[in-house]
Image: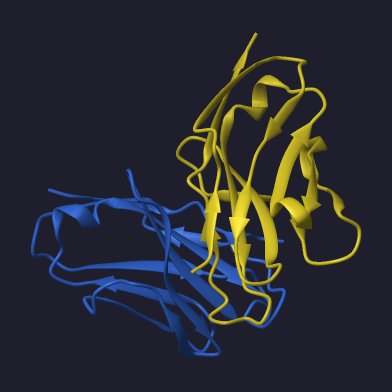
Chain colours: A yellow, B blue
Amino acid sequence: AQSVTQPDIHITVSEGASLELRCNYSYGATPYLFWYVQSPGQGLQLLLKYFSGDTLVQGIKGFEAEFKRSQSSFNLRKPSVHWSDAAEYFCAVAPVKAAGNKLTFGGGTRVLVKP
Amino acid sequence: EAGVTQSPTHLIKTRGQQVTLRCSPISGHTSVYWYQQALGLGLQFLLWYDEGEERNRGNFPPRFSGRQFPNYSSELNVNALELEDSALYLCASGHSGGVADTQYFGPGTRLTVL
């Protein structure tokens, strides 16, 4: 069965510093990959997605992610964090052959931004 | 373009009661997905509807059910509520329900079962 692991439950970063959130997946084939962000009490907002092609994907709010097939990873990065980036971040995968089309989510990483 | 909308925002029910949650997809989207986000359990897939049909179901008991209407809006029904049903219920919509379908989420309905 497919699974998604986000090894870091919490990350604290200073405003202006860089941020990297880790995501590893276990799946029979390369799935579709997504990063979502959830602010407190809110729904999920799509940051970026990878379906195929260039392994470095640009998203909204200055985020980017890099797909590494050899490491089964899809890490999210931002060069300079803003206080408004404090939120919970979820990595998700979906099967390529649309076997049910459901998203499988990682456990999330909560990001705290220090002034 | 309006996003996915859900109603109500919050609900408080007691054990054994029944609840109906509603979702309106983004205009032009035909697929609706439901997820449960319970404390300590993370985000779990519940149901997928496309073109009015239930296409896939997560590992939830039959008391979780739903339907999709001709205008593609959807309802999630939960019967015989249990305390562990307390969660944020998220609805998402997508274009086609086919391959490479990106899901866009609504703000959720917070259900508290007492």
Nearest the camera: A68 or A106?
A: A68
Q: Residue furthest top?
A: A115
Residue B36 in the image: above or below residue A65 = below
Task: Give the x, y percent position of residue A21.
Answer: 66, 35
Quadrant for residue B71, please give it: bottom right
Quadrant holding the N terminus of chain B: bottom right
Task: Say left or right for A83 vs A61.
Answer: left
Q: Is residue B6 above or below residue B107?
A: below
Residue extending farthest front: A70
Outermost residue, right side: A54
Residue A57, percent across and down?
84, 51
Could you tell me residue A61's position as x and y percent?
A: 78, 38
Q: Say which of A96 and B65 sits in front.
A: A96
Q: Residue at x 24, y 79 (%)?
A: B62
* In front of the other: A91 or B63: A91
Compared across the picture, whether A76 is left or right of B93 comes to: right
Q: B66 and B12: which one is in front?
A: B66
Residue B22 shown left or right of residue A6 in the figure: left
Residue under the image location 72 percent in, 22 percent down: A82
* Residue A106: x %, y % from top left: 52, 50
Classify B56 as above or below B33: below
How many numbered dots are placed on residues in this image? 0
